[in-house]
Image (tube, rainbow, N blue to C red):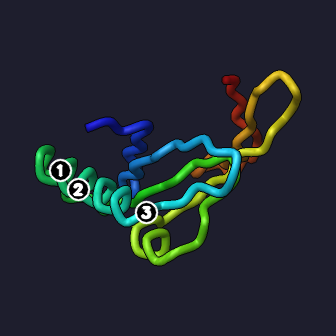
């Protein structure tokens, strides 16, 4: 089982983050929804997690709306293309100070 990014927050929540690259809005199929649900269940059971678990999707072109997105996805972030060099920007806000900024990474 692979988890792209894990955020263990102080407010009793863990975000399991899936990062997907697609030219078009990413579609969560029935098969992929089952895999995501299994991943969350295994993570919770194997580590005996008592916190709430939120699924966060990070995409370049957004998510194609459907019932699986409504059922599984708590947060969705769509990356913004910053330049022709292939770096991406994620808007971020520091939870305790409210300071806003950008997180940049390249591919």
Residue 12 appears in view = no
CB within 8 Å, label 2 to label 1: yes
Quarter of the image where the C terminus is located: top right
Q: Say few, some or many: other residues with alpha carbon within 10 Å of mark 3 (under 14 / 14 to 19 / 20 or more).
A: some
CB within 8 Å, label 3 to label 2: no
User: Which residue bears the numbered disc 2?
Assistant: 38
Checking the image for residue 29, the label placed there is 3
Q: Say few, some or many: other residues with alpha carbon within 10 Å of mark 2 (under 14 / 14 to 19 / 20 or more).
A: few
Q: Is residue 107 above or below residue 60?
A: above
**Residue 33: quarter of image:** bottom left
Q: How many marks?
A: 3
**Residue 98, position as x, y percentages in the image:** 69, 52
At numbered mark 2, what does the secondary structure look like: helix, strand or loop? helix
**Residue 16, position as x, y percentages in the image:** 39, 49
User: Which residue bears the numbered disc 1?
Assistant: 42
Give the mark nearest the N terminus, 3 or 2.
Answer: 3
Q: Say few, some or many: other residues with alpha carbon within 10 Å of mark 1 (under 14 / 14 to 19 / 20 or more).
A: few
Residue 36 appears in view = yes
Mark whose residue sits in front, 2 or 1: 2
């Amino acid at each position: 089982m692979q988890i792209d990014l894990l955020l263990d927050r102080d407010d009793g929540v863990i975000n399991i983050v899936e990062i997907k690259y697609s030219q078009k809005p990413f579609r969560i199929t029935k098969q992929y929804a089952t895999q995501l649900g299994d991943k969350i269940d295994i993570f919770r059971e194997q580590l005996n997690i008592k916190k709430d678990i939120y699924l966060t999707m990070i995409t370049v072109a957004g998510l194609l709306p459907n019932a699986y997105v409504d059922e599984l996805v708590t947060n969705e972030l769509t990356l913004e293309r910053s330049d022709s060099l292939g770096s991406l920007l994620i808007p971020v806000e520091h939870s305790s100070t409210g300071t806003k900024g950008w997180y940049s990474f390249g591919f």
